[in-house]
Image (spheres, rainbow, N blue to C red):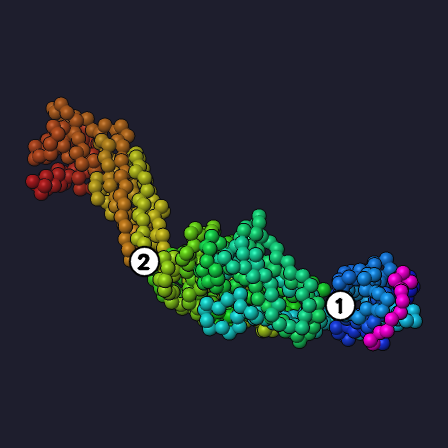
Amino acid sequence: MASLLAVLMVTSVFGAVGTVAAAPGVSVSHGTSQTTVQPGETVTITATFEQTEANSPAMEPSLPEGWTITATSPGIAWSYFEQQGTFLGNLVLSDSEGVTETYTHSYTVKVPDDASPGEYTISSEGSVIDPPTGNQLVDTASTTVTVGAPGSQTTSASVAINADNTNIDASTYGSGSYEVTNTGDTNIGTLTLDLSETMLPDMVFDPYNTAGDDVGKEFTLDSGDVTVQNVEYTNFHNGQNNDAGYDTMVVTLSGFEPGETMSFSVDNDPTSISTTDLGMQAAGPVSGLELTGGTVSVDSGSGPVEATIVGDGSDAGATATVMEDTDESTPSLSVDGVTLSDVGLSDRHSAATVSSADRTLTISGAPANAEVTLLRVEGELNLNDVPTGYDIEEYEANKAVQVEYYTATTDSNGEATVDVTLTDSGTVEESGLNYFTAWVEEPDGDTGPISDYVVLELAANAPPTANAGGDQTVDEGTTVGLDASGSNDPDGSIESYSWTQTDGPSVDLMGADSQVPTFDAPDVSSDRTLTFELEVTDDDGATATDTVDVTVRDTGDAGPGPIGDFQNAPTDPDGDGLYEDVNGNGEVTLTDVQALFVNRESTVVQENEEAFDFNDNGEFNIVDVQRLFVTISESN
């Protein structure tokens, strides 16, 4: 087919034959002579076509049966005709004396899903027409493709970002900041980086200068014998447009063979500084460490293999070891004595403000006797020269200022405790934001998933708030509960409660050191108010107080009627249920003792023994008269 088309083209352009400087000819070569793939994967062939003093160039790929071309990239002034399966040069590539030029074509071939293991050949036959003779000249290049048995090859990679860098202000913007090595035994076709769940929030790709500082940088291949076929930025960080950059970058590659290393750079920024008009480093550059929690995946055609980006032990570096491994454990983090709250940073962040720098974190959910790493990053929200911070959340940091790693071994329950010291470098107003995450050192060496993120803001102690509950009105004789559950400590916890009665008829307060104590409302002859004071103490020793009033209503029991010849009924001046004003004249004096003594056998006294039971023995007798005498005498 190629020779027929070439003859047709040359007859339309042939003219007089002149003297040529070199012998007409054609040369075809492939970028690689052999490669290994799995069934269902693709092979990209890069063919270099050189014609010398010749006309009507054409190149026809030859494939194993059942294999198909899925994509083509013809050289300049060439076209690919799918129906004929042939690359053809345009008429401008011919003249009466022949043309000398070199072109590069590429095409991607799909290996059938059911391809049997073995060696196959893909060839490219190039042809030209010799102007003096009209003869066709041909050259062929080929690549041996070894198809492995399904599952016999592994996909893996080693990723380093600002590797082992001790400069905390290192940047992914610099040349070669990302380095990826193909450690598997099959070609890597796709590399994907996802920053949607980084520990420091809102870190994005900013290739077009829309999301961070006033400088952007697209993916730039800095080294490596690979071909970048396409770079796509996906997943708008704000879900709408690229004003806040992109969460994901997908790089499509060819020729990324086992053992090869590629390096590249790209601009990463925090979205919080997007309103600045300054160039790089307006809020400090983004390093590999600050991308901790992002993910890297590689795909050789049989599905993506993913790993998490974690700190590499340095102040600015990060690493990810991507392996086909399902033995992965996701640990959990908690802080002793601190209640963590969900915050707006992400579903994976929880936070608290504390005043004590010395804390203990517990790592749980890991395998027994496993090595675990705890990472602490003191962050700050640096908005210097930023007119308005973009979409700022509580506890948000956009720059690392101090880094510390801790290692521990879990016990038989898969738990480990780590003592840490929080820091606040105080370089900006919003500082002292200590971010934590943990991961398990997987036995196969791959990077396993990391825990959710804990943020502890180190700040001066905020005192607690005491809340003794609302005032109450109750009936006499009922059981009353006080309630301090509305009390809180904004940066810690309430450690103790203490209730004291400060006014009103005395009651027996049960559970006075609890959150909800109780007492029985006393019998009263008229409505009486009891006052209670609550004192709460937080975990740093700070205290706060509040009071509550409880009004006890007289439910209508008039008490005993007048005794003897007195016109007025006895009264209970102090509301304790005992009627000390026996003669009902509104005063408690020794005349009330005389009145009770004289009328101790009266019907009114005998039928209301509880009203005159001054010695509290459950009955009335002469001893109660004596007790009333003593009480009145002592009060005078």
**Picture disc at residue 422:** none
Is 89 covered by the magenta stretch?
no
Is 15 covered by the magenta stretch?
yes
Residue at mark 1? 104
| Residue 386 shown left or right of residue 13 in the figure | left
Q: Can residue 446 be seen in this view?
A: no
Residue at mark 2? 460
Q: Main SS type for the magenta part? A: loop
Residue at 63 percent across and 62 percent down: it is 192
Q: Position of residue 513 (x, y in %)?
A: 30, 52
Residue type indicated by callout 2: Ala
Residue at 64 percent across and 64 percent down: it is 191
Which one is in front, 455 or 368?
455
Which one is in front, 40 or 519?
40
Q: Where is residue 51 in the image (x, y as percent from the top left)?
A: 81, 71
Q: In what element is the residue under mark 1?
A: strand
What is the magenta range? 10-22
Residue at 11 percent across and 28 percent down: it is 585
Q: For the residues marked 1 and 2, what is the alpha-carbon distance in whole angstroms?
A: 67 Å
